[in-house]
Amino acid sequence: MFAPANAPTPLSYENQKDWTGFEFMSETATMIPAQGPPDPNVVKEEMLKIYPPKTRKKRAKQILPNDPEAPPEIAANTRTIPGIISQRGCTYAGCRGVVMGPIYDLLQITHGPVGCGFYAWMSRRNLARPKPGEINYMQYCMNTDMQEDQIIFGGEKKLRQAIKEAYEIFKPKAIAILATCPVGLIGDDIHTIARQMKDELGINVMAFSCEGYKGVSQSAGHHIANNGVFKNIIGLDDTPDHAEFNMNILGEYNIGGDAWEIDVLLRKCGIHLTSTLSGDVSYEQVKKAHTVQLNGVMCHRSINYIADMMEKKFGIPWIKVNFIGAEATKKTLRKIATFFESKKLAERVEEVIAQEMLALKPVQDEIRARCQGKTAALFVGGSRAHHYQDLFRDIGMETVSAGYEFAHRDDYEGRRVLPGIKVDADSRNIEELHVEPDPVRFKPRKTPEQVEALKAGGFTFHDYEGMMAEMKKNVLVIDDISHHEIEKLIEIYKPDIIGSGIKDKFVIEKMGVPCKQLHSYDYSGPYAAFTGAANFYREVDRMVNTKIWKFVTPPWEKEPQLTASLVHPSRVNGARKNGEAKSWRKPATAVPAEDPM
Ligand code: CFM
């Protein structure tokens, strides 16, 4: 232990109180323990210290030492504190960019300013390889280019025109309209327009009210997209693909070709994928997604809604899968084979695992020898901060701290906490679809006896245990991490690598720590399945074992942190001296009545 919990704070910075009552740091702390891991409670205190009281109170509920036996309750999916410098994106990003974007032949029109439209133009690295004769709209940026005129007088006319124009040029099978912030603010009725255009053009036209402000993060956009895909696309085609073992992978977006790796692996085992939602997927494949025997949920955060709704409406069970990391992939393949209750499939899966490991094991062993004992910290999205821990574990690296950008409590603590999650104003904003079993097409894929037998053998249906259950005790879990907290984390834990995104990559690297982008993979990949794992091991090996980082001097070693304090004008003009205004909160004259903090 480098600091007993009740000892006076052994830090090198001075705690000072300014006249607002806030504590601030006059110089940066140096609290790197001589040996052993830092006490997470002390690290947490160190991170929180600089914040004003209200912020500190809120962040304290989002930074927790882990306990895998009894995961602590984390405040997740709450509003970000303005100015804290969050990694999060917006609701439109979650709907248009994440879930809808990869349906490559669904023509998608962003209704809003061109900046939002441009964002959706291939900025997320979901790859597609349409089959011969199919079209790929992902290369286009379709946008209504809303101007001041439309903001003032309404944009419905322009939207109608845009739909007609797009239809005339491309003759698509279906069109999706995606709303940005101003659309909701001025009240353009995109759903009525979609209905009218559907009748007029005779094709499927659907609208998504995914205005950026609709939720606290992109997570709300996932939910809106799930609802729209479920209502408007899934179930339109009842023709099943003929395959003995037929399933969908939900929540796999083919970043850097991951879905292709998974598909190749499953084919080797004899398992057919009807659709991967949404990674390299066509509109036609999504239409018949309800015809499969099983749904495997990869990213629980972004797609658990569709998985649940498909189970309720069509009787398709879902299981949590993970193809990130060799151990995780083995576990997943065996779980799928168990579900299908086929000896032939189980044997084939073992053969494939043996073959794949024959190639992977030497790479793993060689790299583990160089990486064993090194540490990682992961702050990504809503599932990768969990999944990628498996990949690091494969090569002997421990995750010392991790957190999601926008996940919910169930992604941390497991789905068993779902009934206890408070519905707040922000979540109430998102429609919860009421789903009933389809009178004709509901067909349970397993008999109750089969389900019971599988469960008795330890098989789990529609369950996700979350990140915390798989992380070590006292690892620091940080939800919606801020820039300040990342800086503190680097200073104290000195991780050998951080998995994060473009917003903080170069800040982290200037501090002498390599940063692997786990959203875009630094334009590399794939990392899924066994072949992908080998790519990842090699890249991480290069990153953590290069000497270049030794030549970067962290700024805090050369210069103290700049500090500033708030000075109210009344102090400057001498009012304080005259005893008129002792604090901001108790103003005398000509002082704002509201606390601007
Ligand atoms: Fe799911 Fe994703 Fe993720 Fe996500 Fe994303 Fe992504 Fe992500 Mo970037 S759907 S939650 S909203 S796994 S775009 S493919 S990498 S933040 S961890």
Image (tube, rainbow, N blue to C red):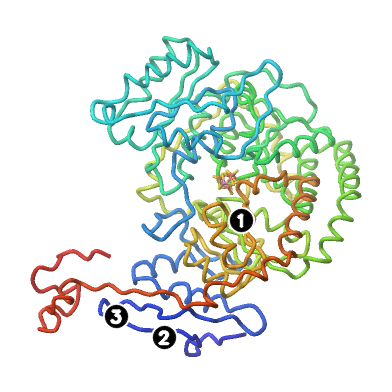
Seen in the image, is 393 located left or right of residue 88?
right
Q: Is residue 191 above or below residue 12?
A: above
Q: Which residue is mark 3?
A: 18
Q: Is residue 527 above or below residue 376?
A: above
The image position of residue 169, as x and y in percent, is: 50, 13
Q: Quadrant of residue 546?
A: bottom right
The image position of residue 263, as x and y in percent, is: 75, 35
Q: Which residue is mark 1?
A: 385
Q: Is the CB of mark 3 within 8 Å of ligand 1?
A: no
Residue drawn at 54 percent across, 56 percent down: 404
Of discs 1 and 2, which sits in the foreground?
2
Under mark 2, the amino acid is: Glu
Q: Which residue is mark 2?
A: 14
Q: Is the CB of mark 1 within 8 Å of ligand 1?
A: yes
Looking at the image, is mark 1 or mark 2 earlier in the sequence?
2
The image position of residue 21, as x and y in percent, is: 28, 78
Q: What SS does tag 2 mark?
A: loop
Seen in the image, is 358 located left or right of residue 217?
right
Of residues 183 and 208, the one nearer the viewer is: 183
How crowded is the residue under tag 1: few (<14 C-alpha within 10 Å), some, or many (20+)?
many
